[in-house]
Amino acid sequence: MPLPSLQRRQLLALGAASAAATLASPAAQAQQPHKTQARIVIAGAGAAGLAAASRLAALLQGARITLIDARREHFYQPGFTLVGGGIKPATYVTSSTADYLPPGVELLTERVAEFDPDGNRVVTESGQAIAYDFLIVAVGLTLEYGLIEGMSPALIGKHGIGSIYHSPAAAEATWQAMSAFADQGGRGVFLRPATEMKCAGAPLKYTFITEDHLTRRGNRGKAELVYNSNNNALFSVPIVSEKVRMLYQERGIQVNYGRVLQSIDPGRRLATFKTAEGSEEQPYDFIHVIPPMRAPEAVRSSPLPWTADKNKAWAAEGWLEVDKGTLRHLRYANVFGVGDIAGVPKGKTAASVKWQVPVALDHLVAEIAGKTSNALYTGYTSCPLITRLGRAMLVEFDYQNNLVPSFPGAIAPLEELWVSWVMKTMALKPTYISMLRGRA
Amino acid sequence: MKELDPLVFLAVFQEMLGPWLWVLLGLAALTTAAFIWLLLHQRGIAPRRLVFAQLLGLAGGALALVLMAKVSSSGFTDAAGPADWILITLVFALGAIGATIVTYTTLGWCRRSRKQAG
């Protein structure tokens, strides 16, 4: 790395170098684009869809690439925790899909209403059928607030209810609610759903951030904090789960296992959880609601998800039946699933997208070129797990629950470090945007 | 899996700084060239000017740390492990060296133009 000689750049360089190393994959290869007339449909223009579109546009010449998504705004979702924590404004995470659209890719601002993999076509909400030779499903997931009785997104920011996942505006409203709680104290209730979810570290981070705000305002003694885990662990990687358990104990955060939020009564500020024995009522002054998550309806009602005989839970939630190493559909060879929709064991995160997309596209382009690819996704993902304002643990792991640190011996994965916080706040967003542009 | 590609670094810096990346790179190149030119033409270092530049360099290092804290939304008590202290040392050192070179070069050129004018 060349050493610059001007201050600002020097400062930023350090953070960026670290983050780029964390998330960086080989940049889009500087190879000649492959000539083809293939029709490729990318359903979904989130992180995975845009990254795939940018890379494909660079890798192929003459292909007809259609990107379909009804939403014109693009959300930098890894930043939602920072908005909800009062560290960044909502504008930090909001931009426009058109800003990242590569030349030559057609954007259709509609929702895919039907996937017809047997007929090799998708049908949009307006009834337009689009045929494809290859389909990349990157539609993300749906937040099912309605599956919690009494809960609705309209309640976020009111009656002590927060939920950073919903949108940038909801994340900001959550910050207002949490900040009011940090001023007064009381009972703070935190949880995670029993379904697969995006960024499983966020519920833990948000508990830590709330605890730190209370402490900094001198109100920690006036507050009781309770974290409700849906199963018997705090995180799917055992060594990380144990570390978080130790930190929660040290910070006086009470942990309940086997609790799933069933209903909420905003008027009485009462949350009801399902337990192994039945149900349990928990009063709250502030609650951070994370809803069940599942595949969008159009995917669930298509032949694309896992089937119940192979994976009952994933079939019920509708995740795409893809090979976990290649992201290729197990029954429809011309279909790939990347990002949150992929039915793979770990990591519905931007870091997963970063590594999944190049692998899936390598297989797709190899097939167009009449070759085979041996690219393999090992499940690598990363989670800068904020443990207080100014510190985080840079947790990186794979399908086998191995820790796979980018800087072994320098940045310990289970150590609360400022340098990991610096990566999260300074360098991850530029790295993410570079990924959308197919440059990282 | 974690191969480091210089193009990735360039892309990330471009996203981070926008057009400022090129402005700063240009200024860095210009200052370095001016510094080397000064060293060659004055056949060595001017000790008094260097000491003064180093004093300002200390302020530059401190300023670098303040700037770093601001852009990373950090406080001044966040450092925890050895990696943090290494980063702090690096930021301070780079800020200090950068400010020293800029000060030394600027003073050298000012003195030179005054001499020529006189």
Image (cartoon, coloured by chain):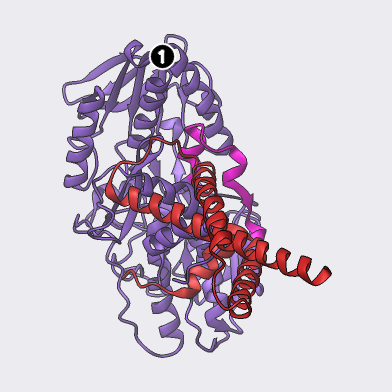
Chain colours: A purple, B red
Q: Position of residue A313 (x, y in %)?
A: 27, 47
B13 on left or right of A309: right
B85 on left or right of A136: left
Residue at the front extreme, as displayed: B118
Q: Position of residue A263 (x, y in %)?
A: 37, 22
Q: Which quadrant of the structure image shows residue A408?
A: bottom left
Count of all numbered marks drawn on residues in the image:
1
Residue A68 shows in the view: no
Which secondary structure lies at badge 1? loop
Instruction: Report crowding for label 1: few under 14, some 14 to 19, many 20 or more residues within 10 A (C-alpha).
Output: many
Identify the image quadrant of the C terminus of chain B: bottom right
- Does A95 lie within the magenta span? yes
Is the residue B55 above or below the residue A254 in the image? below
Chain label for disc 1: A
| Residues drawn in magenta | A79-99
Q: Which quadrant of the structure image shows residue A334?
A: bottom left
Q: Please name the amino acid that badge 1 sits on.
A: Asp
Identify the residue at image location x=19%, y=58%.
Answer: A400
Q: Which residue is mark 1?
A: A285
Of residues B102 and A166, the one nearer the viewer is B102
- Does A440 lie within the magenta span? no
Is the residue A237 above or below the residue A267 in the image? below
Is the residue A59 above or below the residue A377 in the image? below
Q: Position of residue A30 (x, y in %)?
A: 50, 84
Identify the residue at image location x=41%, y=14%.
Answer: A285
